[in-house]
């Protein structure tokens, strides 16, 4: 049996994760009062009621009894009932934006500023974060990215590492991504822009991909980049970093950078980390060309 406690910061995606787990066959219960947790765990593990997968949502709405949770979890484990804790975290700025966009009140912020409510919640939930088996920071994750991580951990049962890698292609003419940790310049590769048959395509299309990758330097660069990054990832993890943004740029962010970003994603996607690829500027040149033609 797998018994997962889903918790974390309000607005970080707990409700979405519970829905995902339910779709994956978990029996899900949200906001169960803390005093009932031990009894619920015992009932779940009882032979007559045993379910193969259970997910229990607990958050700051249990504030009145939150101080009991630590001892309750100790008691559950003392009975030989194993559980896992998934903590969903998120940066303060992103949480504030989400609350403003949805116009919802923070559970602790109905009579105070959102910033103060988030700070208070982060303090009260800190002990749970420290005990967590999995911590997922959803600050930069789309729903599909979060879905991929939940599937990887709880369906595919792959090894978990609290480390998420974002590969982002960009165009230098539009500026380097402000959140980039590492930047690579691929403007040394042949530029499909100068081939009229390829100019209006992108690195997501096979003709452009073949044009860029036929250059021997492209393969050499990818091999050495892979060696460098697989050396660096454990070093960053050892320093406590849980997110890494790798930016790969060409002139317009449409051809070479997209091709290399996709190729790098294919090489590292099966490592024991969360990985996603984004193409920040892939549509910009096309949009500008269309406006000029009109």
Image: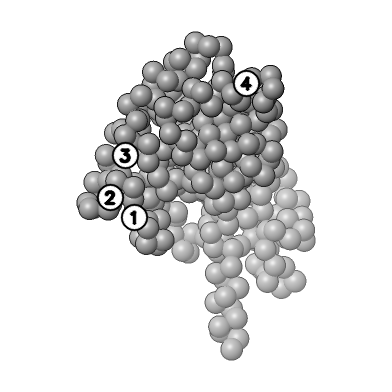
In the drawing, does residue 200 fall left or right of residue 30?
right
**Tag 4, which secondary structure?**
helix
**Tag 1, which secondary structure?**
loop
In the image, 161 versus 262, the foreground residue is 161
Residue 283 in percent (x, y) is at 58, 68
Residue 237 in view? no
Which residue sits at x=56%, y=42%? 18
In the drawing, does residue 250 fall left or right of residue 202?
left
Which residue sits at x=55%, y=38%? 29
Q: How many marks?
A: 4
| Residue depth check, mark 3 versus mark 4: number of the one nearer the observer | 4
Report the disc number at residue 105: 1
Quarter of the C terminus within the rendering: bottom right
Which residue sits at x=69%, y=22%? 48
Residue 50 in percent (x, y) is at 67, 24
Label 3: which residue? Answer: 121
In the rendered structure, which disc, 1 or 3, sits on the residue that comes first in sequence? 1
Packing grade of label 3 (10 A; few <14, some 14-19, many >=20) is many
Which residue sits at x=56%, y=20%? 42
In the rendered structure, which disc, 2 or 4, sits on the residue that comes first in sequence? 4
Instruction: Measure the C-alpha gap from mark 3 to mark 4.
Output: 31 Å
Report the disc number at residue 228: none
Label 2: which residue? Answer: 109
Residue 121 lies in what quarter of the image?
top left
Q: Residue furthest front?
A: 48
**Tag 3, which secondary structure?**
helix
Label 4 near label 2: C-beta < 8 Å? no
Label 4: which residue? Answer: 45
In the drawing, does residue 210 fall left or right of residue 139?
right
Packing grade of label 2 (10 A; few <14, some 14-19, many >=20) is some
Quarter of the N terminus within the rendering: top right
């Amino acid at each position: 049996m797998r018994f997962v406690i889903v918790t974390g910061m309000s607005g970080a995606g707990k409700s979405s994760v519970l829905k995902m787990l339910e779709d994956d066959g978990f029996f899900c219960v949200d906001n169960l009062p803390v005093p009932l947790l031990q009894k619920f765990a015992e009932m779940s593990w009882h032979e007559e009621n045993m379910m193969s997968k259970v997910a229990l949502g607990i958050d700051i709405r249990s504030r009145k009894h939150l101080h009991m949770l630590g001892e309750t979890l100790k008691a559950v484990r003392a009975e030989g009932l194993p559980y896992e804790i998934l903590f969903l975290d998120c940066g303060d700025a992103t949480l504030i934006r989400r609350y403003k966009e949805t116009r919802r009140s923070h559970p602790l912020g109905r009579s105070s500023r959102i910033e103060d409510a988030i700070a208070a919640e982060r303090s009260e939930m800190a002990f749970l974060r420290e005990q967590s088996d999995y911590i997922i920071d959803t600050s930069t994750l789309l729903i599909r990215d979060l879905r991929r991580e939940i599937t990887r951990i709880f369906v595919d049962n792959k090894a978990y590492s609290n480390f998420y890698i974002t590969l982002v292609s960009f165009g230098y003419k539009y500026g380097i991504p402000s959140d980039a940790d590492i930047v690579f310049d691929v403007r040394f590769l042949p530029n499909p822009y100068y081939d009229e048959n390829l100019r209006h395509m992108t690195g997501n299309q096979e003709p452009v991909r073949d044009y860029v990758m036929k250059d021997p330097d492209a393969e050499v660069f990818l091999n050495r980049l892979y060696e460098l990054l697989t050396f660096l990832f454990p070093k960053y993890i050892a320093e406590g970093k849980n997110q890494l943004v790798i930016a790969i740029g060409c002139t317009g962010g449409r051809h070479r950078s997209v091709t290399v970003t996709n190729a790098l994603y294919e090489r590292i996607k099966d490592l024991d980390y969360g990985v996603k690829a984004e193409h920040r500027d892939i549509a910009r040149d096309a949009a500008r060309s269309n406006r000029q033609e009109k």
